[in-house]
Image: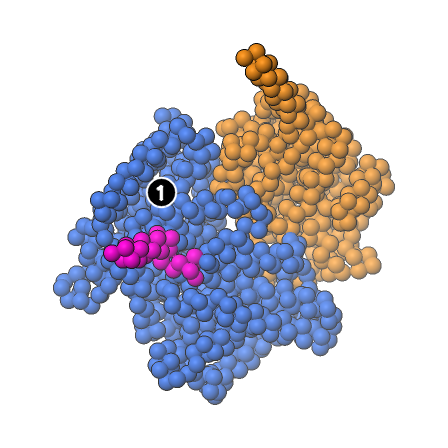
Chain colours: A orange, B blue
Amino acid sequence: MRKILLCAAVLLGILAHTAVAADAKKPIKIGYINAHTAVAFMVQSNSQGMQFAIDEINAKGGVLGRPLELVSRDSKGDPGEAVRLAEELRTRDNVDVLINCDFSSASIAVGGWAKQNHVPFVVTGSEPDSILWQNGNDYIARSNPGGYAWVSGSLQKATEVFGDRLKNKRWVSIAPSIEFGHAVVQSAHDQAAARGLNPTWVAEQWPAYDKLSAGPTIATLERANPDIVFAALFGTDVVKFIREARKRDFIKDRIFIFPSLGVPEHFDMLGAEMPKGWVTIGFPYDEIKLKKPALADFMQRYEAAYHESVKTYLVTGYDGIKIFAAAIEKAGSTDPEKIRVAFDDLRFNTPYGEQTLRKIDHQATIPFWVGVSDVVDGKPKISNWTEFNVGDNSPPDDVILKLRSGK
Amino acid sequence: MSFLFIQLLTGLSSAAVLFLVASGLSLIFGVTRILNFAHGSLYMLGAYLAYTMTQWLGGEGLNFWLSLFLAAVSTGVIGAAIEMLILRRVYHVPELFQLLATFAIVLIAQDVTLHTWGPEDLMGPQAPGLSGSISLLGKPFPSYDLFLIGFALVVLAGLYALLNKTHFGVLVRAATEDREMVANLGTNQKWLFTGVFALGSFLAGLGGALQLPRESVSLTMDISMIIDAFVVVVIGGMGSLRGAALASIIVGVVQAFGILIFPQITLVLLFLIMAIVLVFKPYGLFGSVEDMTVDKTQLSTGALKPPSRHMNYVWLVMGAALLALPLVVNSYGLVLASEMIILALFAASLHFIMGPGGIGVFGHALYFGLGAYAVALMTKYLAVSMPVALLAAPIAAVLGALVFGWFCVRSQGIYLAMLTFAFAQMVWAVAFQWYGVTGGDNGLLGIWPSQWASNKAAFYYFVLALSGASIFILRHMIFSPYGYSLRAVRDQAKRAEAIGLNARVLQWMGLGLAGAFAGLAGGLFVYSKGSVFPTTLDINTTLDAFVMTLIGGLNSLSGPLVGSVVYTWLKSEISRQTELWRLVLGVIILSIVIFFPQGIVGSFNQWLTKRKGEIA
């Protein structure tokens, strides 16, 4: 009898020991909701960026001594499905936090769910600011710059390049009829007026995303005889627009402000067909890295690991993981309420050096670059670029707070 | 003036590509009677292959054109292979199952393309010599667009000659008119079908390849093209070549001018044209009623029987199990179970109209979405409570079903299916583009259940009670005098009319009834998500309902319930296991269509009967 008891005690001791050890080593799970089958080109680089960050962190012993693990699910770009996946990841896969790269509608929907269910959530690929402002809450943080910052930087650059040629002119806009397009065009209206450019908006086109009928749309815009074209197209629509605009002589003698043109995911593809002199966001990594040793180091390591060049949504994905690593470290646990509080003024490391999450809305105040498009040796390039920061290109704090309070 | 002329030409150049794709679709339908959903995939494949060929051969001079031609030929070969390996095995199954099989091919093609060519868009070269523009009435016009218009005319003439001057053409036309007669006259149907499928695929591939100089090649080309091509074929009249040509021109030109006048509703316009044409010409511009002599009993063979006593026990046990579920599963299990039950109601409503009603509806998302948006809009703008808002869901859906249904029951078969599809797409486009009211792609958020139902278990019981009661009523309806009349109309329309049944009114009511319950399901769906999105109205929701109903089996009462549970579970499990979920799901659907055309429950019953027979 005593022997049995002894054996049992020993066994229990071993079990208890392994249980404790297992808990210490238990990975911190990050649920990753992405529109893999809807916008594969974005998600591919985004997920590689995340995995790269996780491998890097785990090689250094993880966070709080625990390794990170990514649990990835395809939302198909459907916000309803994204919400279901959030629920599934949380309660079935027991993830600690959520991250995504999806259509903005899905980001907003999951953001609402995150608040309802108290789960920290980082957005890494949706530009509309309503995610953090009108629909924002304390559980959400974002690692990519928003539409307002893009427009602010673009108009600033356009003013530098074109000066008075922007004033009292006829403007047209073309953007997809999704949240992204509406948000960016609205920002352009507001900010152009605020800058005293006194624009007259003479026409607008809202093609369905991915379904631009370029010919008729451009002919219709041309008819309004604009001086300045504000465009915010994305993906396949960009190529259709540029090819058709060139053939129809729509480009000549006009100023184009096209913030989304420079996203490397489609910028590089255009090759020698890239129009010259259009104002756009850009990622001239090869030039930026000369000033930022951290970026040079990051690019070298990444390219060695994946044999691919660095892209935008790759960096935002990488940063998203870094935000969580820093927040969990700062919170000292994976407790959602503590992570939420840790988001306030969180400092985290990125390939551009140490950055901060803004306290009022958890937007990463990271740098971004705006320049003009150019072609050098048959390859598209951003020239005459300037570094901006999201923090300096946002509405005043009280405006953001007002939007967030829903008044 | 010059602007209008240029806009007209622009519209014609869009029409040119539409015509190439749609004529192939129409030819295939005319002869094989298969509505080939995978035609868009062939179009996409043509574009990708053209890209690869220009990379191999170089995009200069003649090599460019050779690349395009080779891409189209390869697509034709792939099409022939699909016909021989897959479609040959489904000619004997009901029409809607064939549609399901081609949908499975779409899923498979999407994953194969993604893994062959990678996720990034690809940009091919410009057409040599045609990359610039020429001046027409003082305005520049892309010379390639002009070339496309001319090229489409050449293809039209070629097809006309092929159909009218060659032996193959005679057979094709004969088969389009009367398949059985052609078979009786000793023509080898197999090769005729393969030949037509290859020709249609060649045209789709050509259409895709010719897009290379205009846009980047991307993974979403298939769905956007197939919807446009469907619309063109339906407007023109299925199986009619001149119909496809005329309809392409109408669609291309109206869209070109529509952008000018209504830049906000570009999406609605396409379906509006289709609906208007079908209201006045229920069989399209050049289609005829004779083309549509579908054997409707095919949809659901044999009579439905009221459940036996044994079956009632089974239901009781299942009911008890469902009641006990919250004790066993965690909160995700409850969320999934609630969703399955809501979708089961949705599928049951579709089953009611497709099975006993004998009406092949292909836009059931319309009623689901109407119910969903009714709830959301009532909550958002009138701040009503959950019970009141939920009451609005079936009412809105019934109203929609009665209004749209009135137009639908005037046509039959594939036309009716496409008309329901057009209405669903129209309402989807409104929800998607009417930003101020519906919130556009963001949808309407923050619509949670009332306090007393906010707990997940409470909400589950609420869903179970409402859906259970609804499904019970639907089943009861099937065996009511009304249900028998509906089935009489389905099986023997002429005889039913002779004894005084009004077929149209009965079917119209059936649509209303099915719509009401689909609407209720939509309303519940909103509360389960806390929000509503245009995706509740889109083609994927329609397809989901369709797949759930068909894989369960049309010819049994429990078919839609089993179908919705199996399909929802499969979809979520497969996508957990592999990124290639579309491929796996496609193969599974294809296997069901080929090996179990009665659906899961139907095949099970067949097996049961056979076994009983052996024992006896």
Q: Position of residue B183 (x, y in %)?
A: 38, 80
| Residue B596 part of the magenta-drawn span | yes
Tell me if residue A162 can be seen. Answer: no
Q: Nearer the viewer, residue A165 or B468?
A: B468
Q: Nearer the viewer, residue B20 or B441?
A: B20
Q: Check disc 1 and report its element: helix, strand or loop.
A: helix
Query: In the rendered structure, which amino acid carries the disc numbered 1?
Result: Ala
Q: Main secondary structure of the magenta part?
A: helix
Q: Position of residue A202 (x, y in %)?
A: 58, 52
Residue, x 62% and y 50% (percent of image)? A40
**Range shown magenta:** B592-616
Q: Position of residue A365 (x, y in %)?
A: 70, 32
Residue A15: name its quadrant. Answer: top right
Which chain contains the residue that carries disc 1?
A: B
Asked whether, in this view, residue B237 is left or right of residue A296, the answer is left
Residue, x 32% and y 38% (percent of image)? B318
Residue, x 48% and y 49% (percent of image)? B433
